[in-house]
Amino acid sequence: MSRTLSIAIAGAGIGGLAAATLLARAGHRVTVFDQFEAARAVGSGLMLQETGLAILGALRLRETAEALGSPITRLWGISSDTGRAVLDVRYDALRPGLRGLGIQRSAVFAILSEAALASGAAFVPATRITSADAIAGTLTDAHGAELGPFDLILDALGVRSPLASSPASELPYGALWATLPWPEHGPFNPEALEQRYHAARQMTGVMPSGRLRAGDTLSLTYFWSIRGDAHDAFRAAPLGQWKDAARTLWPETAMLVDQITDHDQLTFARYRHRTHWPAATGRLIHLGDSWHAASPQLGQGANMALLDAYALARAVEARSQPADIAAMYVRQRAAHVRLFQLMTWAFTPVYQSDSNILPWLRDWLVAPISKLWPAPPILAALVSGGLGAPLKRLGLSAGR
Ligand SMILES: Cc1cc2nc3c(=O)[nH]c(=O)nc-3n(C[C@H](O)[C@H](O)[C@H](O)COP(=O)(O)OP(=O)(O)OC[C@H]3O[C@@H](n4cnc5c(N)ncnc54)[C@H](O)[C@@H]3O)c2cc1C
């Protein structure tokens, strides 16, 4: 590093906290702004892939995450219409020992925020960012106060960042999510993310998601796909209506569905798909969902945010001018971002849409082909995030 930079990070989410840790450890003056009043985590489980785990490894946090999460070796989905397995991705088809990690979002947040604080990054909570001046290097908060100037501003404000372009509308389908205790004598595979589908209009799934803290009981993340415009009707109707549909689609989940006694136990998440170009202007650089938002269909968003954070820190290490830092950052990440944005855009309606043709093709054409070589290792590379060699571009290798 040629000089110490003053860096503002807007957003203490997965990407922002990883970037804060890396940059503060490298000796930069890092200030993190977030709208939350106090550090807190929201949401249920997510899947870390080899890409994200490798970045946690570079941060020396991988072992902590792996001790809390549940290893996932297989993604497995069955069509309730035909009884056929229409999704069967085994990670070890690409490399023995390769796996994902189901983990509670709160656990990832706790690990990263502790590391960011320990690295010396300063936190400014209760600050809602509304705009940035990319030339002056300043931020403005909801009270009109100007923050800065900074040498660099990282926009890690997530999918609804006011500093990046927004799509006109959200994707038609979102999902209801809940974290529940892992049933000791249940029928679920402790190493698989399992799903059931009725065409692409109904989808439900169970993902092992480890424990929040050492000593806690194991958890799972349950999800139910729902159209965004059907959410009000879901909330207005007696819960029993949804429970009947959920039990019909996947009878074994009755033991989970029965634990839900209030609509508020199911968190509704809507998704957006958009990529913001240019990824950097002046002193302002976008990372994570503020650069590239997508549905969680391929389970890549958090991993992409971690890759971005590492690429950014690497660029700051190697270059000193904002334009040069941005150019190196984008060079390291753009191809992988483009590839996975395209793949997620293509795959999402196959599992969440009103189409009749796409799920038919999925069940009768794509599913049989996907079992034939070389499809299994390609699919494993896709879900593990390794397609396009993003780690190699960052000078990292997969594995510990
Ligand atoms: C239901 C669901 C399931 C998912 N499952 C997976 C999965 O299995 N695997 C995976 O890799 N990804 C998954 N994702 C995607 C993943 O959560 C995101 O891609 C990832 O969190 C993006 O990280 P980020 O740092 O860009 O943004 P975030 O983690 O969203 O952080 C943004 C931060 O900015 C703050 N903020 C927002 N606006 C403002 C403002 N105006 N002012 C100040 N602060 C603000 C927020 O409080 C937050 O702390 C899932 C997403 C959802 C919704």
Image (tube, rainbow, N blue to C red):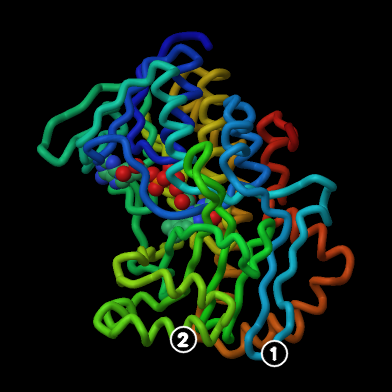
Answer whether labels 2 and 1 touch (C-beta < 8 Å). no
Q: Secondary structure under badge 2?
A: helix
Quarter occupied by residue 350: bottom right
Crowd tier of the residue under label 1, counting other residues whose Cα lies within 10 Å: few below 14, some 14–19, many 20 or above: few
* Relative side of 393 to 280, left or right: right
Please, what is the three-letter code of the amino acid marked with disc 1?
Answer: Thr
Taking 292 as reference, is 130 left or right?
Answer: left
Q: Amino acid at mark 2?
A: Ala
Q: Earlier in the sequence, mark 2 or mark 1?
A: 1
One can see residue 274 in this view: no
Residue 380, given in percent of the width and then of the height, sits at 75, 57
The residue singled out by tag 1 in the image is: 82
Residue 86 in view in this figure: yes
Q: Is residue 295 above or below residue 197?
A: above
Label 2 beta carbon within 8 A of ligand 1: no
Horizontal and vertical percent for residue 41? 37, 44
Whether residue 94 sits left or right of residue 149 in the image: it is: right
Instruction: State how far apart marks 2 and 1 are (Cα).
Output: 17 Å
- The residue that disc 2 covers is 245
Q: Is residue 91 left or right of residue 135?
A: right
* Residue visible at 47% across and 30% down in the picture: 19
